[in-house]
Image (spheres, rainbow, N blue to C red):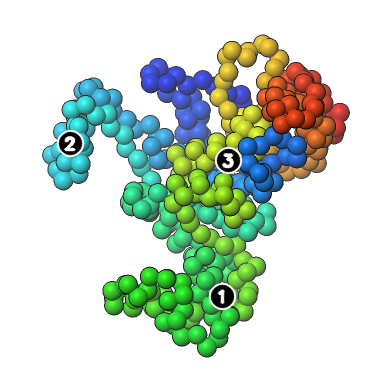
């Protein structure tokens, strides 16, 4: 277990990401990114206090696995030939095969289950209200779509069945609670507004789903009991990026694949003050290996200037302490950081925004901000 600073990864050439290499070598399959707002931090949104989410981003699969073939290289030609020979219909979908680079996106059931297990366990132990499976399964059905399906199957397995409810199940159970005399078809029509436009077979499938939920779950989950259980739901990645802005209070724990998690965690960080104050941890919950790190990259132009916000690194240390069950020390860090920001004694990034908003603030160097945190502990 350890903590590290940012490492530079060249764009378009040079070495591959050392950060990714560490995650893969140690099999740190969870990238844990808590996102919350600290009172006083400048924010571009009206209600940043509604943002309180924890992202479980899969760390070892997806396109970040690094299986790529450079355009024009011999291995790219071999891969294209293999694709053309063995999967001609799929090869036809490559619009410009001669000038294409190729990448492979592996997503496994095993990888999905261990990530979603970690997210569910965290949500249950921390008293969180929901786990959202964020995906692009409407387009990538056998990778992102499979991630969604495997996630739901795990949540509905005997291991968690008595403690969770899916969002769709909650609608069916809620309808029955409101109207005990509601028929199966009426319930189906309520949860699926397009019911009348469905084919007879589709309608029959939906009615069977309603009957199955009521028969198997109403005794254990009905009568409002499901409201106290962990809710499992899902959303498409692009609409998720919109809704974390427009209705952030509806999101709690998010489990998602590598690329989606990369986009989401940085977008959410912007709502609460930027990546300068966004911590992160890379964890294998089975082996105990963990590396905590600032979520931002390197900034060589600021080296040795004693200027930048150390918040992301400090909060990553707080995450490590809490992961080690040193909660008293972690609580002191949060107390100190909250006190320094509330006192408007901040580094240049927050100082600039506070001044632009019309308020007064005290500009501190990086080292001075650290001392201000200690003084508020």
State how many labels appear. Answer: 3
Residue 300 coordinates in the image, percent (x, y): 57, 14
Instruction: Depth check: give the residue in front, 26 or 223.
Output: 223
Q: CA distance from mark 1 to mark 2?
A: 52 Å
- Earlier in the chain: of badge 1 and badge 2, it is 2
Which class describes the residues within 10 Å of circle 1: few (<14), some (14-19), or many (20+)? many
Q: Which residue is mark 1?
A: 174
Looking at the image, which residue is at 19% across and 32% down?
Answer: 97
Mark 3–mark 2 CB contact (< 8 Å): no
Q: Is residue 266 visible?
A: yes
The residues tagged by marks 3 and 2 sit, at their Cα atoms, a distance apart of 41 Å
- Which type of secondary structure does the marked residue at label 3 adopt? helix
- Please provide percent x and percent y for residue 299: 58, 18
- Compared with 5, 103 (above or below) is below
Circle nearer the N terminus (3, 2): 2
Residue at image point 54% right, 70% down: 170
**Residue 148 against residue 341 in the figure, above or below:** below
Q: Earlier in the sequence, mark 1 or mark 3?
A: 1
205, above or below 28, in the image: below
- What is the quadrant of the C terminus in the image? top right
Which quadrant would the N terminus be assigned to in this image? top right
The reply to whether the C-beta atoms of the residues labelled 1 and 3 are less than 8 Å apart is: no
Q: In the image, what residue occupies the spot 50% across and 45% down?
A: 241
Q: Which residue is mark 2?
A: 82
Q: Which mark is residue 268?
A: 3
């Amino acid at each position: 277990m350890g903590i590290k600073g940012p490492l530079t990864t060249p764009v378009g050439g040079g070495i591959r990401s050392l950060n990714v290499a560490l995650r893969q070598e140690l099999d740190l399959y969870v990238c844990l990114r808590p996102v919350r707002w600290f009172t006083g931090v400048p924010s571009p949104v009206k209600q940043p206090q509604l943002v309180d989410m924890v992202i479980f981003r899969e760390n070892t699969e997806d396109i970040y696995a690094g299986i790529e073939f450079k355009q024009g290289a011999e291995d790219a030609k071999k891969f294209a030939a293999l694709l053309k020979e063995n999967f001609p219909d799929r090869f036809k979908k490559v619009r410009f095969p001669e000038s294409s680079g190729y990448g492979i996106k592996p997503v496994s059931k095993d990888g999905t289950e261990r990530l979603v297990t970690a997210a569910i366990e965290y949500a249950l132990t921390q008293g969180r209200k929901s786990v959202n499976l964020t995906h692009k399964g409407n387009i990538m059905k056998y990778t992102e779509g499979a991630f969604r399906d495997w996630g739901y199957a795990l949540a509905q397995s005997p291991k968690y069945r008595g403690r969770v409810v899916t969002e769709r199940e909650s609608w069916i159970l809620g309808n029955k609670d409101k109207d005990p005399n509601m028929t199966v078809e009426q319930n189906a029509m309520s949860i699926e507004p397009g019911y009348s436009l469905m084919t007879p077979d589709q309608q029959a499938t939906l009615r069977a789903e309603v009957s199955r939920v009521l028969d198997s779950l109403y005794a254990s989950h009905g009568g409002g009991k499901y409201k106290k259980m962990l809710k499992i739901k899902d959303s498409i990645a692009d609409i998720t990026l919109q809704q974390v802005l427009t209705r952030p209070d509806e999101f709690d724990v998010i489990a998602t694949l590598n690329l989606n998690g990369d986009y989401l965690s940085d977008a959410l960080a912007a709502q609460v003050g930027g990546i300068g104050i966004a911590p992160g941890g890379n964890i294998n919950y089975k082996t105990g290996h963990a590396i905590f790190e600032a979520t931002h990259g390197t900034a060589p132009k600021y080296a040795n200037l004693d200027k930048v916000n150390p918040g992301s690194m400090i909060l990553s240390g707080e995450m490590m302490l809490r992961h080690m069950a040193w909660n008293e020390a972690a609580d002191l860090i949060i107390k100190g950081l909250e006190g320094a920001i509330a006192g408007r004694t901040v580094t240049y990034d927050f100082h600039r925004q506070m001044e632009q908003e019309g308020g007064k603030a005290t500009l501190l160097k990086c080292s001075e901000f650290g001392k201000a945190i200690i003084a508020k502990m």
